[in-house]
Image (cartoon, rainbow, N blue to C red):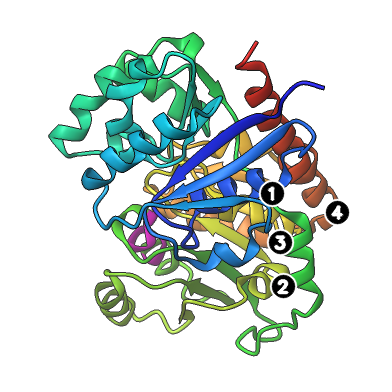
Amino acid sequence: MNKKISVIFILPDLETGGAERIVTTIANHLSRDRFEPKILLLRKKGGYLSFLKKDVEIIDIDTERIRHSLKPILKEIYRRKPDIVFSGYGEVNAYLSLFIKLFPKTKFIARETNVVSQHVTRKEIKFFYHFYNNYQQIIAQSDDMQADLINSFGIKSNKIIKINNPVDFDFVEAKLQFSHKPESFKLNYKNVVAIGNLSARKGFDNLLKVFSRLKNEKIILHILGDGKDREILHQMKEFLGLKNVIFHGRQENPYQFLKFADLFILSSRYEGFPNVLLEAGACGTYSLANNCPGGINEIIQHNTNGEISDIENHEDFSRKIITLLHRDYNSDSIKNSIRSRFSKEIILDKYEKLLFDILK
């Protein structure tokens, strides 16, 4: 019997975000016959700690700033000599890239979280991307992210592997079992749902302009989420006189809104790989998405689980909404279109294969 492959995953903490969720899921899922996963945290805190299996060792270096964490991280790698280091967070990836050459026996993997050139503005971080080719593998979540890393940062294409985000059907279905129709969903009205942080990149300003053209229709727009543009968007709603738009703030169970929605809309200006679009599909709801960079065209299968249109063209987009609301959809085929490509099992097998193959 060969000795097990030791993997150290690195994250700032286990607060509830996309990178944290995927790393927790991978660590839990890896075959214990082959792997020995550990998670190194800058701060041992966050909602996902309770989901982590008990046999995953947590290395807590107890540091507030990412910059200051570098020495303790390198010390732990030197002491433990893992087979693989998997860094799951943009800024850590950047700093760590400089020191990979110090550990010739360890393979280093970085997972990127955004279309970097749109997202990273700080000069010193951009500088580190010159060293990204030191990584044995870099994981991109979407084709757009992969192209961005190659074109904007000169990363060799054979270093990059694309693995999409998974959607956890067990989790979504458990939530749906207890989901009743929200009280704000009116009878004889069509209910349209949009979800996201109330910030410029989510494009809700465009969505309100689109709905200013639908005032005389029996359509209600439900917006879930909170953020720094809340006041501006509320004022815009008043100014445009949109009585049929409801801001619900952050909701404990967004799935009940998705389940009973007649349509889900994604209005973003850019994305990494939008989990909410996967989750709408997992709830069996048809989607209309703005044609923005970040994996949209990898998720939407035209006429099966959704469609893509240009939201900047407010008139067209509003007519598209009316057309889609007059149609009927098969929620099972919407679910299958997502499950067959993005289920947890499929995506986690790709991660396990990557970790196994990198040592060959």
Mark 3 is on which residue type?
Answer: His
Q: Amino acid at mark 2?
A: Phe
| Residue bearing the label numbered 3 | 326
Distance Cα–Cα, label 1 vs label 3: 43 Å
Residue at the spot of label 1: 28
Specify whether 250 is left or right of 278: left
Q: Position of residue 249 (x, y in %)?
A: 44, 79
Q: Choose mark 3 or mark 2, whichever is in front.
A: 2
> Does residue 162 appear to the left or right of 234 in the view shown?
right
Q: Quadrant of residue 134?
A: top left
Q: CA distance from mark 3 to mark 4?
A: 19 Å
Q: CA distance from mark 4 to mark 1?
A: 29 Å
Q: Quadrant of residue 44?
A: bottom left
**What is the magenta range?**
202-208
Residue most toward the front? 79
- Residue 260, which numbered label? 2
Mark 4 / mark 1, whichever is N-terminal: 1
- Does dot 4 land on a helix, a strand or a loop? helix
- Residue 60, position as x, y percentages in the image: 43, 54
Residue 249, placed above or below residue 97: below
**Mark 1 / mark 3, whichever is N-terminal:** 1
Q: How would you rate the neighbour count of disc 2 (Cα within 10 Å): few for under 14, some for 14-19, many for 20 or more?
A: some
Point 39% across, 73% down: residue: 226
To which residue does mark 4 refer?
A: 332
Q: Which of disc 4 and disc 3 is earlier in sequence?
A: 3
Q: Amino acid at mark 4?
A: Asp
Q: Position of residue 328 (x, y in %)?
A: 79, 59
- Which label sits on residue 104? none
Label 1: element kind: helix
Which residue is at the front of the view, 241 or 91?
A: 91
